């Protein structure tokens, strides 16, 4: 693909990931770039959600996307086609990104040129939650087919996120998914988490999610 | 829960995981215990598939289940309710089981007492694929809502598995999931992989999967 740069990131050389993440956050703040770390299981709909979000917001803010993956480029191609700047980050088999790996991506994409950069983390509810990437905010996507018990089984993911998107609500009639339960389980893990039920395919629920993203970006960059 | 033992496993002390895995396999062979390492994303339906499989096969073989999880016990409770022996393995936040951790589970459940032991690995398509647990065979579950592109994005998982279960085929009409593509992508990764489209909720497709499991168990233990 001509329009997708691929970088191979190396595991971080920094002994203290948290200190490195704080340094990245200070730099992003100084550069007025809001960085969202987007995490979910494989297939929860990160790329579809991003494509619609980009289409809706690209005229009001400059958006860049860093797609992390074990070794494919299909996501970055889809994002580039949606009209945002995109790079693909290959982790060489690593199950997460740490702060140093994220910084390699930020340097490659030229983060200061964007109002909003989205890091699409490796698809996985376990490891990405354990490493602070330096993001301004963490957002998780849980899709209806995965089941409402996930906040019980992957507690850390729900603790570290400021927002939770519940995707694929169009298929609620076909799954035993209890929306009341998932809201209550998520809030046990994190009482202040913001929750947005959406359907990335149809756009249902997107105004509330995009309004949150717009307000968070303005607050960070203002 | 009175009927669910929970063990906290420690990361392996063995420097050479592959050698330890081979040692476990030899011991399982000698004891006539077939060990299946079952891997998937969170919510792909591992527990539902196991409950139905146990119900169908429990009168013809002795089945034990080791449920690995970050820190919940909901799966082991469900399996115990279905009538198989079950223990819960807590990984203390680890995203996979290695051979040494698996052996701690085998010792706790008393593997030699069973014809078939199923290890339900941590829900994750990345890390569990990287560590040989000592299992006789590896089986992955991919569910329809996750999308047909997963063999492209998580190549190792499809390479290390001898069988692939495609679950939730009842919702095929509601998702853009191309069965022909997933079969061809999986076979690019692994030409000899056996593929079983099923619906764990209704039992559709189970005879072929259970026949495979029955034949593999008999071949290993015979």
Image (tube, coloured by chain):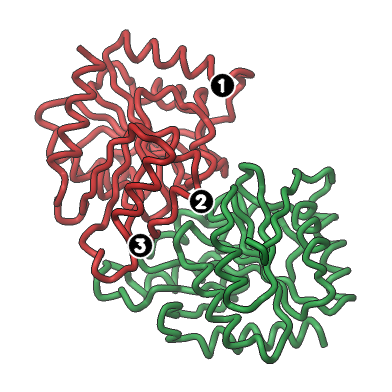
Chain colours: A green, B red
- The residue carrying mark 3 is B145
Judge by depth and name the residue closer to the eye, A187 or B62.
B62
Task: State the SS at label 1.
Answer: helix
Furthest residue to the top?
A: B30
- First in sequence: mark 3 vs mark 2: 3
- Same chain check for tags 1 and 3: yes
Sort mark 2 into few (<14), some (14-19) or many (20+) by Cα contacts within 10 Å.
many
Percent coordinates x, y for residue B176 in the rendering = 34, 67
Judge by depth and name the residue closer to the eye, B47 or B6.
B47
- The residue carrying mark 1 is B17
- Name the residue at 39% across, 59% down: B146
Furthest residue to the front?
A: A2
For the residues carrying marks 3 and 2, which lies nearer the camera in this image?
2
- Name the residue at 62% across, 63% down: A120
In which quadrant of the rendered image does the C terminus of chain B lie? top left
C-alpha distance separating marks 2 and 1? 25 Å
- Name the residue at 84% across, 74% down: A112
Percent coordinates x, y for residue B118 in the rendering = 32, 32
Sort mark 1 into few (<14), some (14-19) or many (20+) by Cα contacts within 10 Å.
some
C-alpha distance separating marks 1 and 3? 34 Å
For the residues carrying marks 2 and 1, which lies nearer the camera in this image?
2
Percent coordinates x, y for residue B20 in the rendering = 52, 16
Task: Judge left or right: residue A137 versus residue A201.
Answer: right
- First in sequence: mark 1 vs mark 3: 1
Please tell me in which quadrant of the rendered image residue A104 appears.
bottom right
**Is the residue under label 1 in contact with that under label 2 (CB below 8 Å)?**
no
Badge 1: chain ID: B
Q: How many marks?
A: 3
Please tell me in which quadrant of the rendered image residue A10 appears.
top right
- The residue carrying mark 2 is B153
Badge 3: chain ID: B
């Amino acid at each position: 693909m001509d329009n997708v740069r691929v970088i191979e990131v190396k595991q971080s050389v920094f002994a203290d990931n948290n200190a490195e993440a704080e340094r990245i956050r200070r730099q992003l703040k100084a550069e007025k770039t809001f960085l969202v770390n987007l995490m979910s299981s494989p297939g929860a709909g990160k790329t579809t959600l991003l494509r619609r979000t980009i289409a809706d917001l690209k005229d009001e803010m400059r958006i860049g996307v860093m797609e992390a993956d074990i070794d494919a480029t299909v996501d970055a191609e889809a994002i580039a086609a949606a009209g945002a700047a995109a790079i693909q980050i290959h982790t060489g088999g690593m199950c997460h990104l740490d702060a140093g790996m994220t910084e390699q991506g930020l340097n490659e994409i030229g983060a200061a040129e964007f109002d909003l950069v989205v890091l699409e983390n490796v698809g996985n509810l376990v490891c990405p939650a354990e490493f602070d990437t330096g993001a301004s905010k963490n957002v998780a996507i849980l899709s209806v087919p995965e089941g409402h018990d996930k906040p019980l089984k992957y507690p850390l993911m729900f603790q570290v996120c400021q927002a939770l998107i519940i995707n694929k609500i169009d298929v609620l009639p076909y799954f035993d998914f209890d929306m009341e339960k998932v809201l209550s389980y998520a809030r046990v893990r994190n009482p202040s988490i913001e929750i947005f039920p959406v359907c990335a395919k149809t756009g249902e629920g997107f105004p509330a999610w995009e309004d949150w993203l717009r307000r968070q970006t303005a607050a960070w960059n203002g």
